[in-house]
Image: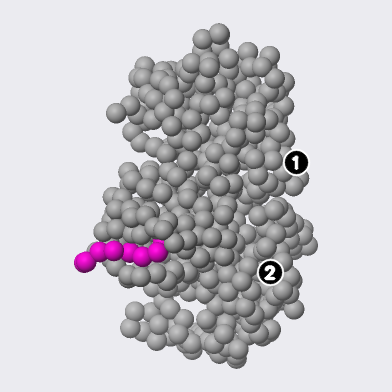
């Protein structure tokens, strides 16, 4: 339970995902379940695709028609609560996630895929690592994840 | 005796923003800061802040400190900063006495803004004085200011935003965070912070607390236990955890001693963190021309402290005859920002507390 251990249950997670037909293109999933005073996702979006409005306590709503999956909101979210997901084919999904630990992964490496409970669930391929001044020390990591974990995968961990 | 229009006590987010807004209005001020640098607690906050752009959301605390300090340095003729300086006396005729190194200084002023912030609460348990037991603020200072690891295996007590954020920063520094203990039955801070920790493998144990610390010369183990709904330990639920550090993050209390000293009307309001001054809508206390801003009048996020600082600086300047050219517009904007920051469910207790201190 989100309130007692920080893990949202599957039904709650699904409320933030769009209908599967939209996932042929990359889209932002905002895992922001509470009303907290915060709006950088909305103000940083160059496509006006994340709505919060005047009351910054409103939880963000993504317009999946407008969202291009660029990933700018991902590293602008102070709660690291946004990722980008795309269903590539019947085998794989592509994620862009925020990452603030060091050392950073390197393109081509295989890392562990981790779920919201912190458990290793699969292996993932690091496709791209972006970290410029614009990212302000929150790296954007593009990873290839087996499709069956599309609702479970949330972050990466170095394989030991 | 030194003469200055406005003395601001405390160079944290509230004090710095107050000085900036007063200077923009044309009013000179002196910031008195007991630490070696201004910036307050912001200088050790490596995470991105919440709020909206006006309160520098998505900027890291350490960078917000730089912005606020740079803003103040733009007014070298109007803002004087004295660091490593403590206020040792405060009198109703607006005389402030300071101690800087070995020097005793008297300042006569027309108005005072007290922006002293808050200090961490402690927790009573057996052996809570063993080396290795820290407040969360000390851990952040060691790690993020001085680059020193506080320990290798840590347990955090408290799942408010500070406890959750500092746990995350400990992991960033390479420390093994064994778990977070929370006495209440639900997590205290924002769930986005909790989820961030959980996905890194850290368990947050609600309805749990520390029973005692064990160690000869330093902390070696702790005993934790499960709590019932009256926050009493349930027999037989004790568990030992090997740690070399324990981090306490169980809330903050306003540093309001200076206010009590000069006899400002005070009230104990638990939702605001403790003893706080009664204030009017412009943050003036029961003593004329003595104002407060930031955590000293109710513990909140730094974003609110910044806006309260701007508001108070603006109002004090106007009162002393230095009206900002955009006074009305700014006043409404600051009030609106504070309302917006506090209007969500997390601001509920705070809103009730603030009602209690309105005079």
**Residue at horizontal 52%, vertical 74%?**
B255
- Mark 1 vs mark 2: tell me if same chain: no
Give the chain letter at badge 2.
B
Q: Mark 2 points at which residue?
A: B353
Res. B220 in view: yes
Q: In this view, does B249 lie above or below B284?
A: above
**The image quarter in which residue A111 lies:** top left
Provide the secondary structure element on which disc 1 rests.
loop
Find residue B99 and name its label.
none
In the foreground, B257 or B344: B344
A60 sits to left or right of B203: right
B173 sits to left or right of B266: left
x, y percent for residue B163 = 47, 55
Q: Is residue B213 shown in magenta? A: yes
Res. B81 in view: no
B218 sits to left or right of B6: left
Magenta-tinted stretch:
B210-217
Give the chain letter at badge 1.
A
**Residue at horizontal 62%, vertical 39%?**
A32
**Residue at horizontal 37%, vertical 55%?**
B239
Q: Name the residue under label 1.
A: A53
Q: Is residue B57 shown in magenta? A: no
Q: Is residue A125 above or below residue B29?
A: above
Characterize the magenta stretch by its predominant secondary structure: strand
């Amino acid at each position: 339970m989100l309130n007692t251990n920080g893990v949202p249950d599957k039904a709650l997670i699904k409320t933030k995902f769009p209908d599967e037909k939209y996932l042929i293109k990359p889209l932002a999933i905002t895992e922001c379940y509470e009303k907290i005073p915060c709006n950088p996702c909305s103000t940083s979006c160059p496509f006006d695709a994340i709505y919060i409005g005047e009351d910054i306590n409103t939880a963000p709503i993504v317009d999946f028609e407008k969202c291009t999956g660029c990933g700018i909101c991902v590293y602008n979210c102070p709660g690291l609560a946004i990722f980008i997901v795309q269903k590539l084919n019947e085998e794989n999904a592509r994620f862009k996630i925020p990452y603030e630990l060091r050392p950073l992964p390197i393109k081509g490496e295989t890392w562990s895929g981790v779920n919201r409970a912190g458990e290793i669930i699969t292996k993932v391929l690091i496709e791209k690592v972006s970290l410029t001044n614009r990212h302000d020390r929150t790296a954007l990591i593009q990873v290839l994840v087996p499709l069956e974990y599309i609702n479970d995968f949330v972050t990466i961990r170095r394989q030991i | 005796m030194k003469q200055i229009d406005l003395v601001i006590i405390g160079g944290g987010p509230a004090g710095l923003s107050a000085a900036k807004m007063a200077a923009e209005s044309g009013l000179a001020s002196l910031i008195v800061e007991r630490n070696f640098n201004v910036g307050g607690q912001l200088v050790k906050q490596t995470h991105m802040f919440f709020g909206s752009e006006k309160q520098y959301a998505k900027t890291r605390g350490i960078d917000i400190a730089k912005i606020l300090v740079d803003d103040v340095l733009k007014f070298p003729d109007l803002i004087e900063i004295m660091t490593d300086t403590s206020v040792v006396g405060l009198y109703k005729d607006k005389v402030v006495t300071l101690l800087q190194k070995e020097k005793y200084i008297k300042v006569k002023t027309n108005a005072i803004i007290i922006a002293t912030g808050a200090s961490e609460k402690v927790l009573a348990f057996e052996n809570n004085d063993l080396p290795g037991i820290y407040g969360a603020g000390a851990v952040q200072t060691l790690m993020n200011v001085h680059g020193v690891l506080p320990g290798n295996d840590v347990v955090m007590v408290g799942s408010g935003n500070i406890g959750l954020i500092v746990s995350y920063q400990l992991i960033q520094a390479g420390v093994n965070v064994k778990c977070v203990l929370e006495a209440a039955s639900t997590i205290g801070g924002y769930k986005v912070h909790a989820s961030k920790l959980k996905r890194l493998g850290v368990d947050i144990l609600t309805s749990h607390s520390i029973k005692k610390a064990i160690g000869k010369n330093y902390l070696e183990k702790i005993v934790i236990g499960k709590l019932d709904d009256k926050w009493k330990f349930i027999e037989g639920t004790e568990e030992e955890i090997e740690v070399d550090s324990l981090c306490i993050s169980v809330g903050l209390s306003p540093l309001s001693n200076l206010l009590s000293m000069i006899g400002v009307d005070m009230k104990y309001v638990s939702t605001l963190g403790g003893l706080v001054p009664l204030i009017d809508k412009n943050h003036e206390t029961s003593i004329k021309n003595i104002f407060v801003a930031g955590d000293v009048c109710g513990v909140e996020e730094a974003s609110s402290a910044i806006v309260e600082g701007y508001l108070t600086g603006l109002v004090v300047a106007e009162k002393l005859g230095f009206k900002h050219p955009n006074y009305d517009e700014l006043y409404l904007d600051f009030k609106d920002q504070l309302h917006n920051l506090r209007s969500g469910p997390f601001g509920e207790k705070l809103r009730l507390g603030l009602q209690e201190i309105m005079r």
